[in-house]
Amino acid sequence: MKPATIRDVAREAGVSVSVVSRVLNDGPVAFETRQRVVDAMEALSYRPRAAARDLNRSLASSVALLVPDLTNPFFARLADRIATEARAHDIQVVLMTTQEDPYLEADLLTSLLDRSVGGVIAAPTGENPEQWRKLADRGIELVFVSRTVDEVDGADSVSIRNAEAAATATRRLLDLGHRRIGMISGPGHTSAGRQRQDGHVDALRAAGVPVGAELLRHVPYRGTGGADAVSDLLGLDAPPTALIVANTAQVQSALLRLRQLRTRVPADLSVIAFDDNPWLELLDPPLSTVRQPLDQLAFHSVELVVGRLRGTAPSAPRVVDLPAEFIDRGSCRALVSAEAAL
Amino acid sequence: MKPATIRDVAREAGVSVSVVSRVLNDGPVAFETRQRVVDAMEALSYRPRAAARDLNRSLASSVALLVPDLTNPFFARLADRIATEARAHDIQVVLMTTQEDPYLEADLLTSLLDRSVGGVIAAPTGENPEQWRKLADRGIELVFVSRTVDEVDGADSVSIRNAEAAATATRRLLDLGHRRIGMISGPGHTSAGRQRQDGHVDALRAAGVPVGAELLRHVPYRGTGGADAVSDLLGLDAPPTALIVANTAQVQSALLRLRQLRTRVPADLSVIAFDDNPWLELLDPPLSTVRQPLDQLAFHSVELVVGRLRGTAPSAPRVVDLPAEFIDRGSCRALVSAEAAL
DNA sequence: TTGTATGCGTTATCAT
DNA sequence: ATGATAACGCATACAA
């Protein structure tokens, strides 16, 4: 059984295809005529073919959502919220994963060129600025979320204040008396990776605490980098008494290594992890974290694309900076002065 | 800058559009001519518009992947693997989430009718058999993974042997001396929910252990059903000494409640959870689980759609039943006879 | 092997 | 308000 076309509907309703088309796009149609057409569509269970519409229109209604890693609860949950938000705005989103691979990302981006999407919400790897620019040139609306690509202008961006969030975590540990604080953050080519490290260092400087370069680690998102960094840090002559894991993807790997090394938290090491997720609360002890406002991230990113798609939006790129929330759970302990001096 | 069309390429290469089209679809073209065309495409950075190709024939090459819940690590990770597998086969997958909502699922399914996808891999809610049938009637290849919809025939299916897996878990607990075993499984309208409960009951019967109906709970995937079931079970006059959480989505919720109730695992309660994920290993104690072979699920489901899309596949629906693996970690303890009799 | 002509389902233009 | 018809970009019989 072949799907009904617009012509079938027109015939059934005794009108021309133009009228049917206008009904579909709420054009000017006499009330009674519209009713007949609607009935005909119903009777034939007609559905306009997306491919055929996109062919003529430049107005593509669907948007793509590009996340770097679905196995990371943060991005999986972000995708979930964004899907919900998009549904509320009645726009179709197609989800794709780059798996933190620049080549895959590049492939997907060029494939997006062919597909007729009106916009893209993405947490980019940061390695394909030229490709992103091509999309922008094609008139595709760009909204970066959680991460951004500085080289691309004209794109909106939604994220937390990474430097501030990291500084908050750092100050918390400083207040508890820690002086040697290890930090595992994302690769330097990602905005989040840089900014969080910067915030951390700034907080240390502001407190007059020496910045130990050997305590600062940039670690790739994929692989066991987080675990290896943990081993390295704990193997130092002067190992850290506290650790901030700011590389969301490596939290699990880092925690696993700590367990394998039988490092007690917080007795041996105080720990703060970026990005809350339900499992962190189940750990023993429950982990203190920096929580990103998922709902807000989702809300604003969808809001921004929709705004541009509907045409109602200033042409200038907009940047939404959200505060992160520090959640104290009990994975950090105060150092007594004797230990601090050690 | 407007994207180049097939006509532009033809002009640039000094050939007709049909030649270019044949180059795109590896039709018969003289070697030298093909070279010229390829060069022209390169020069114009030409990319065939997906919408235009789909319009002609249902040569649709892309497939949709429908998962019910991205916040559930099992499905998020399954989606990740399937994406990888699909990439290996060089086919585009668009990911969508039904969020365990039958209405959303229905919407997505009808939207898939308009979109030109060649196939769908899905873990269905089980509530929209008619919609699924419509897709099948339209010639869209269906592969159910992890769950299935019995009412739809003609669809392939890939999943673990749920009953067997549940029985294995149950026998494990029986061997340890447990006689009152609680089970929290998915809703009765899902295949997995039914089969796991059946396997559990069969194992009990085979061992001559009375089946306590009050110990069997079907719990919805969304919400706090898992936690509530835990409270109920532990509040019974004769509470269970062991618990199987076979509702993947409710594992986290159930564990959280156990922690809140200060129920010690395994001292007060032995626990087995369905679907391994990296976080379970980090818990204290690490949780014993029934692990589904993610890679195999992904491999076969992609293999099946691709087979049908390429046309090389028997017309009869195929069913792939995979064994699950029981992972013993230490969240179950042996009951001494005195306790068992209690 | 290559070119011509036509169709795919929809929207846009321009009459009526 | 409605209708006829030309695009849109590509694939494909069929002819050359």
Image (spheres, coloured by chain):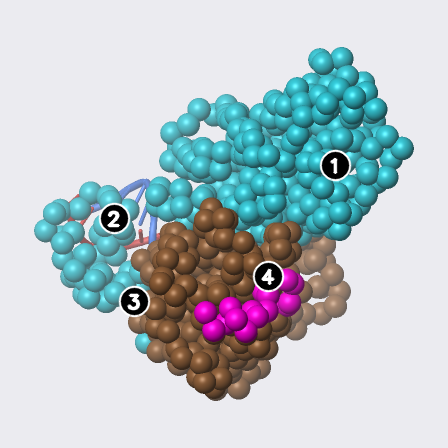
Chain colours: A brown, B cyan, C red, D blue
The vertical placement of A11 against B122, above or below, is: below
Q: Position of residue A328 (x, y in %)?
A: 64, 67
> Does residue A337 belong to the magenta stretch?
yes
The crowding category of the residue bearing disc 2, from other C-alpha atoms within 10 Å (few below 14, some 14 to 19, many at least 20), is few
Q: Which residue is mark 1?
A: B268
Q: Which residue is mark 4?
A: A331
Dominant SS in magenta: loop
Start and end of the magenta stretch?
A: A327-342
Q: Position of residue A209 (x, y in %)?
A: 44, 81
Q: Foreground mark, 1 or 2?
A: 1
Q: CB atoms at circles 4 and 2 under 8 Å apart?
A: no
* Disc number for residue B4: 3
Q: Residue at x 67, y 70 (%)?
A: A29
Q: Secondary structure at mark 3?
A: loop
Q: CA distance from mark 1 to mark 2?
A: 70 Å
Tell me the subunit letter for badge 4: A
Q: Residue at x 18, y 57 (%)?
A: B37
Q: CA distance from mark 4 to mark 2?
A: 63 Å
Q: CA distance from mark 3 to mark 4?
A: 58 Å
Q: Which residue is mark 2?
A: B22
Q: Position of residue A116 (x, y in %)?
A: 45, 63
Tell me: A268 left or right of A212. right
Q: CA distance from mark 3 to mark 2?
A: 17 Å
